[in-house]
C-alpha cells in the first residue's frame, strides 16, 4: 500500500471525525454519563460505517453505469457534502432531542452520517483499501466522539460551531485534490 493511500484515508476519516466532534461537543456541554458516552460512540461509529457502505454500493453501481465519470461524480459529492456541512454549521440549528438514547440518538446518528454517504460514493476512487478505510472511519468517529463528549464543557459553543465548518472545508479541499490527482495522473 502506498503512503498516498494512507494519507487519503486519514484525510477522509479526519473530516468525518470533525463533524462527529462538533455534535459531541454540544452534547458534552450539557454533560453525559459514561454509559451515554459509550452508546453515542457506538451509534455514531456504526452509522458512519453503514452509511459509507451504502454510499459505496451506490458508487459501485454508478461506476458500472457511468465508467470513469463516476469517479469525478464521487469527488463532486465530497465537495457538495463539504459545502452542506458548512451551511449547516453556520445555521446554528438548535435541537431539543436527547442524543444519549432512543429516538434522539437514532436521528443524531443518521443525520451525522449523511456525509458518509458521499464519502462512500467516492471511496472506490481514492485508491485505498476498503477495509482500511472503514476501520479508519470507525476509529476516527469513536475518538472524536470521546474527545467531543469529554471536552465539550471546556471547549464550549465556539468549538462546536467551528468544527463543522472546518470539516466542510477539509471535505471540499479533499474532493478537489482527489479530482485533480485523478485528472493529472491518468
Image (cartoon, rainbow, N blue to C red):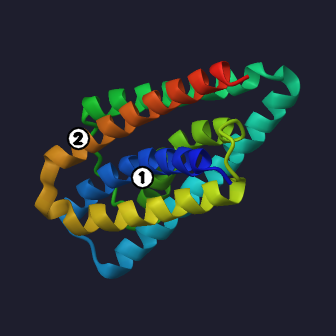
SS of the residue at dot 2?
helix
Q: Is residue 118 left or right of residue 145?
A: right
* Residue 38, x across and y down, in percent: 41, 75
Q: Which residue is mark 2?
A: 161
| Secondary structure of residue under mark 1 | helix
Nearer-N-terminus badge (1/2) = 1
Point out the image quarter for the C terminus: top right
Kindly identify the residue that appears in the image at 83 percent across and 23 percent down. Answer: 67
Q: Is residue 1 above or below residue 41?
A: above
Expressed as whole percent of the image width and height from the top left, the position of residue 42 reads: 50, 69
The extreme right residue here reads 64
| Count of labels in the image | 2
The quarter in which the N terminus is drawn is: bottom right
Residue at screen point 75% across, 19% down: 69
Q: Position of residue 114 (x, y in %)?
A: 53, 41
- From the viewer's perspective, is 172 left or right of 89? right
Image depth: mark 1 or mark 2 in front? 1
The residue that label 1 is drawn on is 17
Residue 136 position by quadrant: bottom right
The residue at 26%/30% (across/down) is: 90
Label 2: how many residues lie within 10 Å, few (<14), some (14-19) or many (20+)? many
Amino acid at each position: 500500500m502506498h503512503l498516498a493511500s494512507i494519507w487519503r484515508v486519514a484525510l477522509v476519516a479526519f473530516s468525518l471525525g470533525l463533524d462527529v466532534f462538533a455534535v459531541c461537543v454540544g452534547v458534552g456541554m450539557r454533560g453525559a454519563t459514561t454509559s451515554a458516552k459509550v452508546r453515542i460512540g457506538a451509534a455514531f461509529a456504526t452509522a458512519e460505517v453503514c452509511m459509507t457502505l451504502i454510499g459505496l454500493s451506490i458508487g459501485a453501481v454508478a461506476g458500472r453505469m457511468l465508467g470513469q465519470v463516476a469517479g469525478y461524480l464521487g469527488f463532486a459529492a465530497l465537495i457538495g457534502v463539504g459545502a452542506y456541512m458548512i451551511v449547516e454549521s453556520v445555521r446554528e440549528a438548535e435541537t431539543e432531542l436527547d442524543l444519549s438514547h432512543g429516538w434522539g440518538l437514532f436521528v443524531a446518528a443518521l443525520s451525522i452520517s449523511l456525509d458518509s454517504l458521499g464519502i462512500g460514493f467516492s471511496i472506490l476512487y481514492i485508491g485505498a483499501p476498503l477495509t482500511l478505510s472503514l476501520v479508519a472511519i470507525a476509529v476516527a468517529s469513536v475518538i472524536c466522539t470521546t474527545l467531543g463528549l469529554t471536552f465539550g464543557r471546556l471547549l464550549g459553543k465556539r468549538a462546536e460551531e467551528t468544527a463543522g465548518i472546518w470539516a466542510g472545508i477539509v471535505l471540499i479541499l479533499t474532493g478537489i485534490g482527489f479530482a485533480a490527482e485523478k485528472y493529472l495522473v491518468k
